[in-house]
Structure formats: structure tokens, C-alpha cells
Image: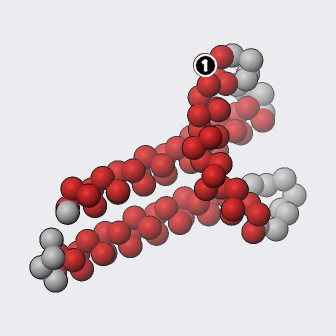
Amino acid sequence: MAALFWLIDEILRLYFWAVILAAIMSNLIAFQVLDTRNRLVWTIADFLTRITEPALRPIRSVLPYLGGIDISPIILILLLQALRMLLGEFEVWLWRQGLI
């Protein structure tokens, strides 16, 4: 059971970093530091967009328009961190109950 909690925590941690990388890459592309005509850049950007967009889209639909500033990655990062903390607390609770 502890291995399952570890696996879920690691997946959430990796997704956390994917959101950060997608936000950085998006800004670098927007400021034309990176060129999407480069196949490697396009492939990485496309991969990061495909894995983060399903989680960011519902957040963006709820947020009001902020003048072109997208804070949905920050909100998603906070939610992921809160989920990791809750997962850790649940694991400790299960351990104290003797279920693990």
C-alpha cells in the first residue's frame, strides 16, 4: 500500500514539473526566444501542451479575463501541492489506524 502512495505522489510531482515547464516554454515561445519551426522545440511544446491542457482548460473557463495574463498554471500548481499534502496526511492516517 505504501508503494501505491509513493507512485501516486511521484506522478503528481512529475505533473507539477510538467506544468512549470509548459508555462516556461509557452512564455519563451510567446517572446520568440524559441522558434516552433524547430522540430524538437515543436515536439516538446506539443507534448507539454497535450498533457497539461486537460487540467488547465477547466481552470481557465472559471477564471475571469485578466488582460492576457494566464494564472491558471499557478492555480493548478497550488492544487497539485494541496493534493500531495492531503495524500500524505491520508497515508499517515491509514498508518495510524493500522491499515498499512
Name which residue lies at 44% across and 67% down: 83
Rendered-image quadrant of the N terminus: bottom left
Look at the picture and state if 42 lies above or below 2. Answer: above
Q: Is residue 34 left or right of residue 99?
A: right
Label 1 sits on a secondary structure element that is: helix
Q: Between residue 35 and residue 91, name the one nearer to us.
A: 91
Which one is nearer the viewer's eye here, 63 or 68? Answer: 63
**Residue at 73 percent of width and 23 percent of height:** 36
In the displayed orientation, state which residue is furthest to the top: 38
Q: How many marks?
A: 1
Task: Residue at 39%, 50% (x, y): give it.
Answer: 11
Q: Which residue is mark 1?
A: 40
Q: Is residue 71 visible?
A: no
x and y percentages locating residue 75 in the rendered image:
62, 63
Task: Tell me the colour scheme of the image.
Answer: secondary structure
Which quarter shows the C terminus? bottom left
Identity of the residue drawn at 35% across and 51% down? 10
Q: Residue furthest bottom?
A: 97
* Res 90 → quadrant: bottom left
The reply to whether residue 83 is visible in this rendering is yes
Where's residue 43, x and y in %? 62, 25
Taking 2 as reference, is 40 above or below it? above
Q: Position of residue 2 (x, y in %)?
A: 20, 61
Residue density around tag 1, few if under 14, some if 14–19, many if 20 or more, within 10 Å: few
Residue 64 appears left or right of 85:
right
Question: Residue type at mark 1?
Answer: Leu
Say which quarter of the image contains residue 12: bottom left
